[in-house]
Amino acid sequence: MTKPTFDIIIRNADVIDGSGTAPYRADIAIADQKIVAIAPALSLDGYEILDATGLAVAPGFIDVHTHDDREVLDAPTMLPKLTQGVTTVITGNCGISLSPWLANKIPPAPLSLIGTQKDYRYPSVQDYAKAVKQAQPAVNVGMLIGHSTLRVNAVADLNRGANAEEIKVMQDLLAEGMHAGALGFSSGLFYQTSKAADNTEVIALAKISAAAGGVYTSHIRDEYNGVLDALAEACDAGKEAQLPVILSHHKCAGPANWGRTTETLAYVTERRKTQAVGLDAYPYTAGSTVLDPDYVDGVIRIMISFSQPYPEMQGRDLADIAAEWQVDQKEAARRLHPAGAVYFQMREDDVERVLSYPHTMIGSDGLPHDSHPHPRLWGAFPRVLGHYSREKKLFTLAEAVRRMTTLSADHFGLKRRGRIALNCWADLVVFDPATISDQATFASPKQAATGIHWVLVNGAIALADGEVSAKRNGRFLDRQNERYQS
């Protein structure tokens, strides 16, 4: 009897196909990097068998909100993501992308979160894409082009809006990047590098993304008291430029705004009636970014994730450091700078409300270069599946998977990823629904999740029982190829 030519069979698995519908038992056959057969359980044979009895198989998770721009080059094994079942990362969020910029100065915050001057060495997206292909990371890489990165190229004084000439320089850089395969344009109007930009500047750039079929993602100007106005600004930009807008890491920050997600989600629902609006979130009550004394209020807990002058303070609470130094917390923050911090700025009911919203995608927003990172870097996706789906029952397992796969793929134009169907790329994760759990904590953040058995990227095994494969099979995802591939 001739053995079938299938490369890999995932046998007798409960298939969660990404659509949100109930799982079904089946065998999945993989050949030439694609899913080539889905058949009744125990009916297929192949060269390599993965016995998934008692386990679930889902599309590989798509992390729509990462800052992995440099990580995919410097640490291409991508262990923090592979061990969560993530097979695709979207980089360049919050207006921060590693390209296009050949740095002629020290990168200002928040660009400093992902690299030093020597790291910003890709003057074009084409150069960056070439570097990704050479590094061959273990996961697929789709990228956004950051507004702050464009501004450091073109705007002489970041404390003012761009003039017409400077906007033209940024438009040309963005157009080149979109032509080279970027998925869209991102902004971070919250940050000092882009705070002076008005919506006219943003819209002028968003229109370039729109013309190429891209998206606009926004770390909005204010997630605190002015959150509704900031949401309106982002949605207005998407509507004016005629492209989908994605609201990054949606939250209502600070005690004065706790509970206001009832208002913000109602606003998003209203805007969705007339335009394409999506959002992403991470499953924690704390965020993480640069340490900014302006956001030190003496009320919320703040933990230091790194400090250049005082590296020994990583992982410690700002309040304790301030008490030790016998200064107030704002002064301690100034002394620690440049630094990063974890801000415990949200309330659990708001987090659950945002996660429960049917249009919310999952993004980790992890900062891989922090010496003591937020645990979301290693734990976001298993936390949704284990804590929020299995234990808190916010949504079914199938619905949780949908938020991480088809919803994300559809928003970013990845036509043959994020779903288990014939002729789709074989990005797959096999896990135990009963045991999958995040292990990373705020005290000990660099901990791999439990319950993940196999991860496949483009038809090749990338992770098997915690062990990384020697051969890496990730790709740079060119928007044009991904969007229109049949």
Image: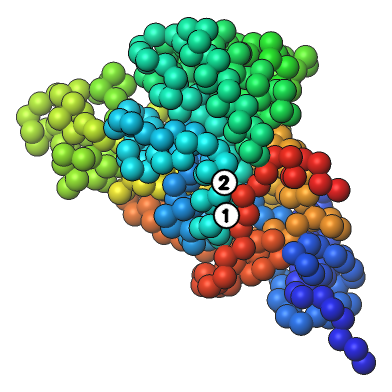
Identify the element where label 1 is drawn.
helix
Up-down relation of residue 203 to residue 342 (above or below)? above
Query: In terms of secondary structure, where does tag 2 sit?
Result: helix
User: Which residue lies at the image location 59% right of the left edge and 33% below the top edge?
Assistant: 177
CA gap, disc 2 and disc 1: 6 Å
Vertically, is 174 above or below 440?
A: above
Answer yes or no: is residue 288 visible: no
Q: Which residue is mark 2?
A: 129
Compared to residue 186, the image places residue 405 above or below, namely: below
**How far across and how far down the image is residue 387, in percent?**
55, 49
Count the numbered circles shown: 2
> Do residues under tags 2 and 1 come within 8 Å of each other at their CB atoms?
yes
Amino acid type at image mark 1? Lys
The answer to which image quadrant residue 433 occupies is bottom right
Look at mark 1 in the image and give the residue it sits on.
133
Answer left or right for 475 relative to 127.
right
The type of colouring in the image is rainbow
Q: What is the crowding at mark 1: few (fewer than 14 residues within 10 Å), some, or many (at least 20)?
A: some
Measured as percent of width and height from the top left, residue 69 is found at 48, 44
Q: Which mark is residue 158?
A: none
The residue sitting at the bottom extreme is 1
When asked about the image quadrant of residue 28, the answer is bottom right
Three-letter code, disc 2: Ala
Q: Mark 2, residues whose alpha carbon is within 10 Å: few (<14), some, or many (≥20)?
A: many
Would residue 327 appear left or right of 261 to someone viewing this image? Answer: left
Of residues 4 and 443, the one drawn nearer to the viewer in this rendering: 4
Q: Nearer the viewer, residue 243 or 329?
A: 243
Query: Which percent across, then down, holds residue 463?
Result: 57, 68
Name the outermost residue toward the right: 1
**Residue 464: image x %, image y %?**
58, 72
**Residue at point 69% right, 61% down?**
458
